[in-house]
Image (tube, rainbow, N blue to C red):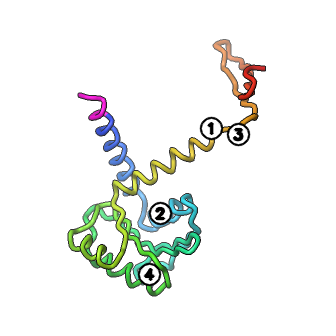
């Protein structure tokens, strides 16, 4: 097996694990997860009310963009009624973009209608990849230090104690 095919297999396994974890959430928890994901992307988000939401679960705003998002935690493909609902809901909430997130993907009719109405679609694989990229970027931010700052870390010794070593990234050990 080539290194590339191992990478692709591992990536698909990670996606399936992420998607499976989304199914453990209630529909309301999944909506909050989507709102939190878009908040990490720099949007301000709010959840719509549970009843009478006009086909929109999350409103996400950033700059001049206001997006109506419908969240479907379906294992089956979403039909074009999801696209119709979020398109109408985007108008109701005065949004200039609309998005449907459906873990199970989309029917051909939904894809066709989304193209003609400019509704964006995000399937389970795409959503899992987005969440993964956010986690990787967040981890990178945590471990990246500004230039000239000292990094202090502890080294555990086998005798049960620890010592601290300070490393100045511009000068080396001190």
Q: Position of residue 89 (x, y in %)?
A: 42, 83
Q: Residues within 10 Å of mark 3 (few under 14, many from 20)?
A: few
Provide the secondary structure element on which disc 3 rests: loop
Q: Earlier in the sequence, mark 3 or mark 2?
A: 2
Left or right: 43 with respect to 76?
right
Q: Quadrant of residue 155?
A: top right
Find residue 146 and name its label.
3
Please state which of the two labelled residues, at mark 3 or mark 2, is closer to the viewer.
3
Sequence-first disc among 1 and 4: 4
Residues shaded magenta: 1-6
Decide which of 27, 126 is in the foreground and name it: 126
The answer to whether mark 3 and mark 4 are in CB contact below 8 A is: no
Q: Secondary structure at mark 1?
A: loop
The residue depicted at 22 percent of the width and 68 percent of the height is 107
Q: Marks 4/2: CA distance?
A: 17 Å
- Residue 160 pos. (x, y %): 68, 17
Q: Dot 4 lies on which element? A: helix
Q: Nearer the viewer, residue 124 or 137?
A: 137
Residue 143's tag is 1
Characterize the local packing of mark 1: few (<14), some (14-19) or many (20 or more) Cα atoms within 10 angstroms: few
Q: Residues within 10 Å of mark 4 (few under 14, many from 20)?
A: many
5 within the magenta span: yes
| Mark number displayed over residue 90 | 4
Q: Is residue 50 left or right of residue 88?
A: right
For the residue pair 47 and 167, the one nearer the viewer reads as 167
Quadrant for residue 3, please give it: top left
Find numbered disc 2 in the image and state the secondary structure of the residue it sits on.
helix
Tag shown at residue 34: 2
Task: Please tell me whether the stretch drawn in magenta is mainly helix, strand or loop.
Answer: helix
Q: Are marks 1 and 3 in contact (CB under 8 Å)?
A: no
């Amino acid at each position: 097996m080539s290194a590339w095919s191992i990478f692709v297999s591992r990536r698909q396994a990670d996606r399936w694990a992420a998607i499976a974890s989304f199914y453990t959430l209630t529909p309301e928890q999944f909506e909050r997860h989507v709102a939190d994901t878009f908040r990490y992307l720099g949007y301000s988000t709010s959840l719509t009310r549970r009843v009478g939401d006009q086909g929109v679960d999350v409103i996400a705003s950033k700059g001049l963009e206001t997006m109506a998002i419908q969240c479907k935690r379906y294992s089956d493909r979403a039909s074009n009624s999801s696209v119709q609902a979020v398109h109408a809901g985007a108008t109701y909430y005065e949004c200039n973009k609309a998005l449907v997130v459906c873990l199970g993907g989309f029917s051909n009719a939904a894809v066709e209608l989304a193209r003609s109405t400019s509704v964006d679609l995000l399937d389970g694989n795409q959503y899992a990849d987005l969440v993964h990229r956010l986690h990787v970027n967040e981890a990178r931010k945590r471990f990246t230090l500004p230039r000239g700052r000292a990094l202090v870390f502890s080294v555990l010794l086998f005798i049960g104690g620890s010592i601290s070593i300070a490393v100045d990234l511009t000068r080396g050990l001190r």
